[in-house]
Image (cartoon, rainbow, N blue to C red):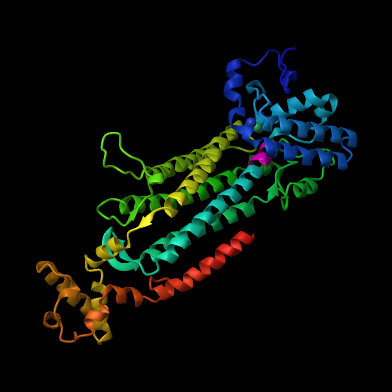
Amino acid sequence: MANDKLWGGRFCVQTDNLTDDFNSSVRFDKRLYKQDIKGSVAHVKMLAKQGIISNDDALKIQDGLEKILLEIESGEFEFDIALEDVHMNIEKRLIELIGEAGKRLHSARSRNDQVALDTKMYTKEEILNIKNLLLELLEAILAKAKENIETIMPGFTHMQKAQPVTFAHHLCAYFEMFKRDISRLDDAHKRMNASPLGACALAGTTYNIDRYYTSELLGFDSPMLNSMDAVSDRDFVIETISCISFVMMHLSRFCEEIIMWCSKEYDFIELDDAYSTGSSIMPQKKNPDIAELVRGKCGRVYGDLMSILTVMKSLPLAYNKDMQEDKEPLFDSIDTVKMCLNIFTKMFLTSKVNKDNMYKSAKTGFLNATDVADYLVKKGLAFRDTHKIAGELVYYCIENSKCLEELSLDEFKKFCELFDEDIFEAISLKTCVEKRTSTGAPSPCAMGEVIETYEKYILEQKKE
Ligand code: ARG
């Protein structure tokens, strides 16, 4: 035989080993075996329903595919690089197992619609897995937030102490971010609800196929309506990695803060020993390696996104082999984000919050200076004037190594006659936080309301 490949008819010699090796994707696409088999079963049921193959052949094929599934799952199946990809490996084995009938499976189908289908089904499933991990993280954040509604800490802008907030408030900022990530994933998932199967190589087929039937069997809303688009679209891969990049970006910000918080300079939290590491030379060290690694892996996922965007740039219609390069970035970003979410949630949940240190830190740095200015506004002055008075007071405090609440009323009055005894109560950290009652602000009462809606949100999401 000149060339024993499934497509070998028009070839005169065997493929070079180097070509087989370079061309093949089975090393990484074998993880699509379940989707491949599921897609083939749907395809074959449709072929039989439409009278394109006999019921008898269809049953034999389904039987064979089931056997192959067992072989793969028990580790018996031997994937062969010379058979290029998961699709041809399975088809070749099917023919080995059931003979003639196996050769009929690929009627009215091409690997081009097959690979698009498998990748899309895999991506849809993984989006749900990522979403569940995000929900677990949200539950962890909420649990910690509830324990820290009154835990006062400094809030920062420009990395400089700004105004007092609570740890719950700070944590719930991340709740919002990850909640948006879930909605981005949901949104991408919705757009994946059209099936490419039946687009064949690029131009559909002359067989009387029923694409609505396969699309329904496989849990899609409808078939994709342009066969060329169906085989050349990888938007869903790009969107998924893009959504994952957002998750990683948010995780990296959270990790950065955790790394700072567990340095002695802050000492706001302590990570559990189980999620920390030591140094090979410095015996005293306890390092936040996990948080650093999650932060670092964000870069790797951005790389995956850049790589698929660049592969798809300027590709002409329809299928091009370049598109085989979609899978490694997709799989890598999915594996990475799942690993990161899993360990991050455990590390975060087991961390210890040093409430006293947070409070002590909030006491320095004039976090209540805005409240001094606001106090005078309430006495009738304009904010621009009170801002200046408060600034002068801060300067006076720096010169005299005091904080604002340590000044005497006489000292306050030197800067403005309108100061009264009630200034001390007005600028205590507790008041500063409790009075910030606007929607979305840190006061325990405003936070309480928000936390209630978060609880409902989690319940609803879990029902879905
Ligand atoms: N392994 C290929 C991929 O991942 C499958 C599609 C190949 N199609 C083709 N006509 N060569 O993209």
Point out residue 301 in the picture as x, y percentages from the top left corner. 47, 42
Is 117 contained in the magenta span? Answer: yes
**Relative vertical location of residue 9 with respect to residue 298 in this rendering, above or below:** above
Identify the residue at horizontal 63%, vertical 38% (top origin): 317
Residue range (magenta): 114-119
Identify the residue at horizontal 75%, vertical 47% (top origin): 215
Is 30 contained in the magenta span? Answer: no
Q: Quarter of the image containing the C terminus?
A: bottom right
Magenta span main SS: helix
The reply to whether residue 81 is visible in this rendering is yes
Front residue of 69 and 357 = 357
- Tell whether 360 sits left or right of 110: left
Point out residue 144 in the picture as x, y percentages from the top left corner. 43, 61
- Tell whether 163 sits left or right of 324: left
- Tell whether 139 sits left or right of 286: right
Point out residue 402 in the picture as x, y percentages from the top left corner. 14, 69
Identify the residue at horizontal 33%, vertical 43% (top origin): 287
